[in-house]
Amino acid sequence: MFRIGKSLKKIRNGTTLVLLLIISLILLMVSSSSYDISPKKIGTSFLSIFQVTASRSSSFISNTINSIGELKQLEKEHDILLGKMEDYQRRERDFIELKEENSRLKKQLNLKETSAYKLEPARVVAHEPGNIFNSFVIDKGSSKGIEKNMPVIAYQNGFQGLVGKVIEVSMFTSRIIPIIDNTSFVAARLLDTRYEGLVNGDPELQNSLIMNYVSKNAAKFLHDGDLVISSGFQSIYPSGIYIGRINGVNVPEWQTSLVISIDPIIDFSKLEYLLVLTGDKLNNE
Amino acid sequence: MNRKVLLLIFVVFIAIVLKTTVLSDFAFKGIKPDIILIMIIIISNFSGSYTGEIVGFSTGILEDLLSMSPLGFNAFINTFIGYLSGITVGKIFLHPLIITVFQVIIGTLIKSLLTFLLLLIFVNGKADSVYTLSFIFELLFNIIITPVIFFLLKTLKLLPLTTNSRF
């Protein structure tokens, strides 16, 4: 009797295992193909509410605790800032003069006016649960005009750096794939030497990039610390946005081009706020 | 499905949400321990294969929805690991923590193998990133964090008494 019960239990466990594995495989096959409305998309929209709630609750609690200490700090900063303001007023006058002079010179050189993009600020609310995929979720979705494939940038240490692009959009959140993912590719250019190549995430190292397809002739002109920017060539990413700095150049004998290691300009572990480029260039009239 | 299993699924779901939000900074050089895998192994080790595979599948689906991975990816891996971890119930008579740590090592290795195979079949260009230095760090993190999660689940009285836990 005991043996029969044990055998039945084994059959039940085995059948459930096979059934669940088959369901998983069917879901994998369906969601791997490119359907616009997938079961994953519907589920993500619903579950993202929990992520946004958890993230906002934790930041509310930590902000409340920090705000007490910040009050004293603010008083000190207030005095310092008053002094700085006078300095900035003087600088602003200089800046206006320089801008006018710059505009005149540009017109003489027949160059386009400086332009900006329509930007939607957003906050990172969730990261990937695992280590294989690289993505994060922001608190703005289709309700704020975010669309798939929109480029994302951020400001860190005085640089406007390229973060990645939007890959999934739900009503209130969007998923971003960063440029450090090895399936993410950006057409890039070396700022000083103007050599072009293709940047993607290093599959061997987390938070690192590699640049391929740079001509071997460029090797003698490249130095550690040289800046790499987006080239905008046949790409969704606009040109001139900082990507990173060179931290090593390999010259493989079996390849016709260089393999350049790059440290991203953006520290992705510290990324909190970013900007989604939601529109084309706006010309400053 | 009884109430206890639903409670376990809910607890692991809370852990997934916290892992992706509040605890996302808990990483070394971008590598995080796989607390979900550890929780599934502990639950399965105490409750058997059936509960293990049900909890594994349900939480795997939730993990897929909150991740860039295709739907069914983590569900497949977690179901398989949930089932495997439960088959030792009543067969090995060692302290449950020792069994769990050992199973976490085996589970991490099996997970990496399944991840590699599924990525090779279903996701283009991702299989290269499985067996890197990050994998060693993840394995070490998992071993270190296992006792913490083990005692946390025990303190919360979420683990039932089975043959493996009589010590």
Image (cartoon, coloured by chain):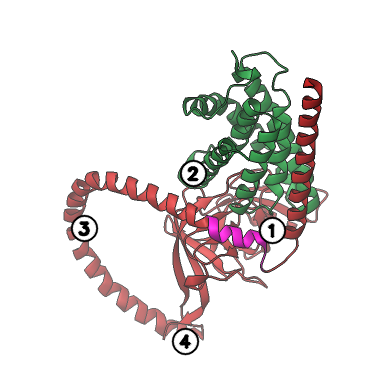
Chain colours: A red, B green
For the residues bearing labels 2 and 1, Cβ distance under 8 angstroms? no
Q: CA distance from mark 2 to mark 1?
A: 47 Å
Secondary element at tag 4: helix
Q: Which mark is residue B18?
A: 2
Q: Are marks 3 and 2 in contact (CB under 8 Å)?
A: no
Residue located beneath label 1 in the image:
A218
Check the image and report above or below for A283 versus A214.
below
Question: Which residue is found at the position 77% from the left and 47% from the top?
Answer: B118
Residue B125 location in percent, x, y?
75, 53
Q: Which residue is mark 4?
A: A108
Q: Going from the N terminus, do you reach mark 1 or mark 4 first?
A: 4
Q: Position of residue A106 (x, y in %)?
A: 46, 82
Q: Nearer the viewer, residue A108 or B77?
A: B77
Q: Dot 1 falls on which chain?
A: A
Three-letter amino acid code at the position of disc 3 = Leu
Expressed as whole percent of the image width and height from the top left, the position of residue A71 reads 20, 49
- Disc number for residue A81: 3
Q: Are marks 1 and 4 on the same chain?
A: yes
Magenta region, mostly helix, strand or loop?
helix
